[in-house]
Image (cartoon, rainbow, N blue to C red):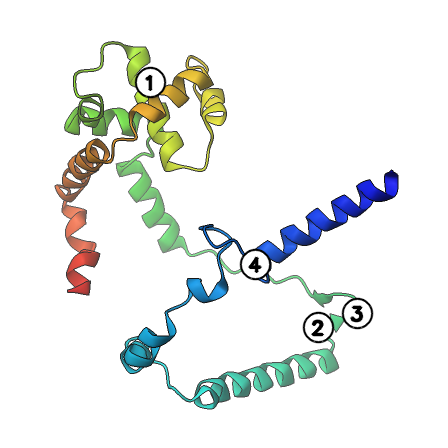
Amino acid sequence: MKAMVAFEWATLFSLRVALRNGSIFIAHSFSFRSQTHMLIPAAEWLIKRNNLYGHLGLPQDPHAFLRPVLEQLDQRLAALGKAVDEGTVRIDTAVHLDPLDAQAGDTEADRLRRAIFEAHPPGQLPEIILEIDSATRFSWILLGREPRSRIELLMVYSAILAHGTSLSAADISRMVPEISPAAIRQMMKRLEDERMLRLAADAVLEFMHEHPVAAHWGAPISHRLT
C-alpha cells in the first residue's frame, strides 16, 4: 500500500514538472498549452520575420548576434581569472570578494534630498487614496452612487487594493480590521464590471494629468505605437 502511495506521488510530481516545462500540455488550458501555441504561428513568422527582426534591431544571422556576446564573455572570464591570480577574488564552493569600501557621501545630493522631502513630506497611502477620491469621486463611479457610510467606503478601497495587488481578501482584512474577508470578497465581485472600472480609472488618470509633472512623462504608449 505504501509503495502504491509513493508511486502515486511520484507520478503526480512528474506530471507537475512536465506541465510546467511544456513536455506535455492540455489543449484547452491557458497556463499549460503547447509551446507551439505560445509562439508566433509558423506561417505568420515566415511572412513577417523580416519586419519583426527589424523592429527588434536584431540580425537574422545568429552568429552575428552571438559573436559580440561571446567576445564579451571571454573578456570577463579573463578578467575574473586575473582577479583570482591576484588574490582579489577567491573561488571554492562560492565566489568570495573583499568587502567594498563605502563611497564618500555627496553633501550636495544629501542637501537636495532634504530640501525635497521638507517641501513635500511623504504621504500615507490612506491619505493619498482619500485625497484622490475627493478630487475624482472614483468611489461614486464604482458604486453608481454616493457611498452611504464610512464602512462602505472602506470596503470599496479594500476591494480596489485587492484587485490591484497580489493580496487576497484575507490579507487586506488584516490591514483593515474593521472589514471582514467575506465583505471584501463581496465588494470585489461587485466592482468587477469592466465599464465602471474603466470610467473610474480614466477619472483618476485625468486627475493625474492635471499635475505639471505629467508633462514630463512622455507620450502615451498608444501614441508611440501609431
The CA distance from mark 2 to mark 1 is 55 Å
Measured as percent of width and height from the top left, residue 165 is found at 41, 37
Label pair 3/4, CB-CB below 8 angstroms: no
- Say whether residue 6 is left or right of residue 160: right
- Which residue does the image show at 26% across and 24% down from the upper left? 130
Query: Which tag is nearer the camera, tag 2 or tag 1?
Result: 1
Label pair 1/4, CB-CB below 8 angstroms: no
Q: Which amino acid type corresponds to the residue marked 4 in the rendered image?
A: Ala
Comes first in the chain, label 2 or label 4: 2
Query: Which tag is nearer the camera, tag 1 or tag 4?
Result: 1
137, above or below 17, in the image: above
The CA distance from mark 2 to mark 3 is 10 Å
Task: Between residue 43 and residue 225, name the one nearer to us.
Answer: 43
95, above or below 192, in the image: below
Within 10 angstroms of label 4, few (less than 14), some, or many (20 or more) residues? few
Helix or strand or loop: what does disc 2 sit on? strand
Comes first in the chain, label 3 or label 1: 3
**The label number, if any, that marks residue 154 in the structure image:** 1
Label pair 3/1, CB-CB below 8 angstroms: no
**The label number, if any, that marks residue 102 in the structure image:** 4
Comes first in the chain, label 1 or label 4: 4
Q: Which amino acid type corresponds to the residue marked 1 in the rendered image?
A: Leu
Mark 3, residue position: 92
Measured as percent of width and height from the top left, residue 53 is found at 33, 80
Label pair 2/4, CB-CB below 8 angstroms: no
